[in-house]
Amino acid sequence: MTIHFPSVAYPPSGDGYWNPVTSTLNWCEEDYYATTYAAEIVNTVTNLYFMYLAIRGLISCRRDQHDTIFAIAFAGFLVVGLGSFLFHATLKYPMQLVDELSMIYTACIMCYATFAFRKSRPFAIALCIALIALALFITLYYHYLQDPTFHQNAYALLTTIAVFRSMYVMEVSLRPSRRLTGGARPGRNEDGQPPEVHKLSDNKTDDQRNQKILESMWRLVACGLSIFLSGFVIWTLDNEYCSILRDWRRQIGLPWGIFLEGHGWWHLMTGTGAYFYIVWAIWLRHCLSGKHDDYHLRWPSLLFSLPEIVRVSDQPKNTDTYQTNSGRHLLNDVGVANGASKKVR
């Protein structure tokens, strides 16, 4: 027995308020089928979630006094969401540049946050100048080429460099078995540690705390990367099999066809993955600054909540309200990481 869900036939695509299309890209979602004021309605609306995540991050930075560089990164995140909203609504080339180039600039900001921490002032200034020059080169060369592949590769390379560098620093600074001991070595502080790594205590309690933090960080990284890469896979399938997906959408009708808008899923999933990355970078920065006991990860549920880094003084008194089945282990880790035993009821 075949089950048919109630649906409405897709209206035909047509001309819209923002015609003609001037962008070099036009995605798989059909144009102006829902409203004359948004060329790709699903691709437009899904950016509201992108902007929500950015605003959430900005509020967290202000409330919990995270380093300014991360507030700047979330501001860039917000510009990406706004630029993408305007691009998909209008399919105009200037709005496409706002969308795509703000991704490059935000990736450069995260590269600076990753490589400049605990470095000398001359190094930080030189790195800043180099990244500005790189961003300017990418901007001009991309405008000259107008080849989306160049932009995609540049963004992927910058993001990959920042992520793997953060992984390296996290492992060296937190995993007890990887922290170097002994005399100073070339390129290292007198305590034998890499310059960017804060000196950590050798006592067993600190090792246990750092191991717990590291495990929770890896869960955060794994979840964020899985969501981001899954979004990339869906984005690729949406591009490769666009004609088939359009046929399927028209066969099942609205609103069910919306769930086959792959580029919309790309916005939701890469936005979430990028948010996870910045949250992880914030937590790692606090640990490198020796503030292990001042901040912790609050992540009530792996599936139904978003992580954030909060000051210990901001932890609600009734912590049981945050302990769900999926989040109980994480919060118990936090209790150990903060050096406080916490009875879980």
Image (cartoon, grey):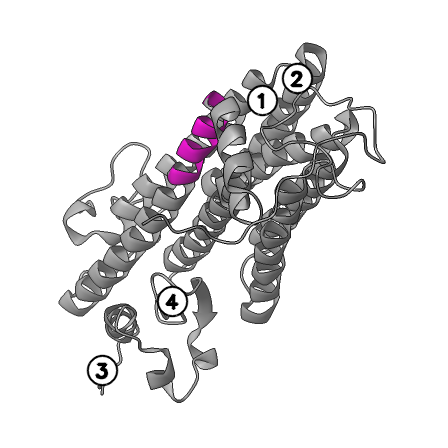
Dot 2: what SS? helix
Distance from disc 4 to disc 2, alpha carbons, whole Å, reads 39 Å
The amino acid marked with disc number 1 is: His
Query: Visible in this render: residue 123?
Result: yes
The amino acid marked with disc number 4 is: Trp
Camera-nearest label, 1 or 3: 1
Dot 3: what SS? loop
Find disc 4 in the rendering and name its residue.
299
Q: Position of residue 196 (x, y in %)?
A: 39, 44
Q: Is residue 247 left or right of residue 221?
A: right
Label 1 packing within 10 angstroms: few (<14), some (14-19), many (20+): many
Q: Are marks 3 and 2 in contact (CB under 8 Å)?
A: no
Q: Residue furthest front?
A: 1
Find disc 3 in the rendering and name its residue.
341
Number of marks in the image?
4
* Dominant SS in magenta: helix
The magenta region covers 230-240
41 inside magenta stretch: no
Of the numbered discs in the image, which one, if any, rests on residue 151? 1
Distance from disc 3 to disc 4, alpha carbons, whole Å, reads 18 Å
Q: Quadrant of residue 284?
A: bottom left
Name the residue at 68% across, 44% down: 79
Q: Does residue 270 sit above or below 333 in this rendering? A: above
